[in-house]
Image (cartoon, rainbow, N blue to C red):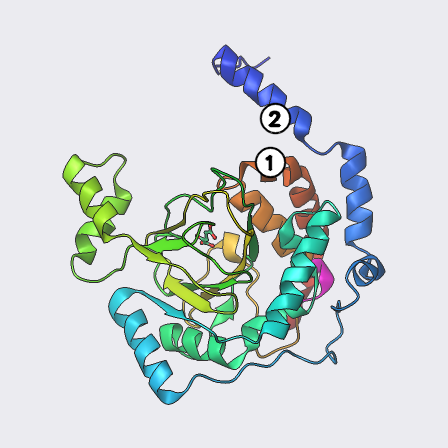
Amino acid sequence: MERDSATPPAQAARKLLARLDLSRAEIDARLALALDPGYWKSLYPAFSVGDESSAPPHADALTASQYERLADNLASRGYFHADSVLESLTIDAMRGCIETIRSAGWPPVFAYVYDQFWTIWRLAPIKQMVKAGLGGGYRLISHPWCHYVSPVVGASGWPPHVDGNLPNRISIWIPLTDATLDNGCIYVVPGDQNFARIGELRELKSATNLQLRELMQRGRALPASAGAIMGWYFRILHWGSVASGAGHPRISTVMEFIKAEEAALPSELPLFDPDRELPPLLQRLFAIGRSIDYYKRFELRMRRYAGLGRTLMRAGDAANRKSATTAT
Ligand SMILES: O=C(O)CCC(=O)C(=O)O
């Protein structure tokens, strides 16, 4: 038998956490529900599952001067922030969906079973900005996520990180409630000026006092109203800040994109073409499962759902293989 080399407190903590994991019976019951489009439709009737004919949301394209400014910010600083871009009707419905999913005991990312969480990325201003960053023909990466920061003291978004030390990728983040200085808005370290030094810093296992102070001083808070769009290249350092406890939850959704000519990592597959049909339910569940597994390093509470995530990936794998065969 293999010896457990963890310290006794670490072993005790692991045992305690393991008790929170969904049981096999709970995973099976949830899998059966997750595979049933009828269940999702009755849970949130305002949204559809696999209905290509349902009306896509609307958003005006960015004006030429808006676009020029934002594209310039993205090119020079590595990120952009556009307020008041998406209609409140669209945003309210998405927020309502996440609240409903959560109340039914699912992690918020299950909102990605619904068509509307996929069609949002096809809206004109988002397409304009992803194209500005990556050129035409880009694809969606299988890493959807929904962030939910409760309005309690000490709750926080994700700690400082880069989305990957990889070129030709961009993340687009949409706040579904106002993201404020009090409820955990995003901070970035712009990639301008001494970007090379900041880039190196990201790789360091520890930082000097000077590096740490420089990094803190460069951090820029990005409060944003619901319906804004924000985006950053993968190598831009960013984080969700710590909430002070007052006000409303900070809810947001995010999607990652990759340039047409860039080779994806296996962990980014399958990629989705934003100009083709929406992914089938099984592939959505695969992407949800993958993200749960991937992002539990940022959100410890996702450990509880890790077994479900892996089960969804196994269920979705056949759909991935089928779509890879049809695409060739
Ligand atoms: O919303 C957050 O707290 C962090 C968002 C983020 O860093 C991301 O999605 O990459």
Percent coordinates x, y for residue 61 in the rendering:
48, 85
Q: Give the residue drawn at x 46%, y 69%.
A: 229
Q: Position of residue 27 (x, y in %)?
A: 76, 39
Q: Are marks 2 and 1 in contact (CB under 8 Å)?
A: yes
- Badge 2 marks a residue whose secondary structure is helix
In the figure, 122 relative to 285: above or below?
below
Mark 2 residue crowding within 10 angstroms, few (<14) / some (14–19) / many (20+): some
Between 291 and 81, the residue placed more toward the observer is 81
State the residue in front, 165 or 80: 80
The amino acid marked with disc number 2 is Leu
The amino acid type, in three-letter code, at marker 1 is Arg
Please give the range of residues in magenta: 279-283
Q: Is residue 291 left or right of residue 30?
A: left
| Chain-order first, disc 2 or disc 1 | 2
Q: Which mark is residue 303?
A: 1
Residue 67 lies in magenta, yes or no? no
Q: Position of residue 162 (x, y in %)?
A: 37, 51
The residue depicted at 55 percent of the width and 78 percent of the height is 123
Q: Residues within 10 Å of mark 1 (few under 14, many from 20)?
A: many
Indicate the position of residue 264 as horizontal and vertical percent values: 46, 60
Magenta part, dominant SS: helix
* Viewer-side residue, 18 vs 247: 247
Label placed on residue 94: none
Residue on which disc 2 sits:
17
Residue pushed farthest front? 246
Does residue 282 belong to the magenta stretch? yes
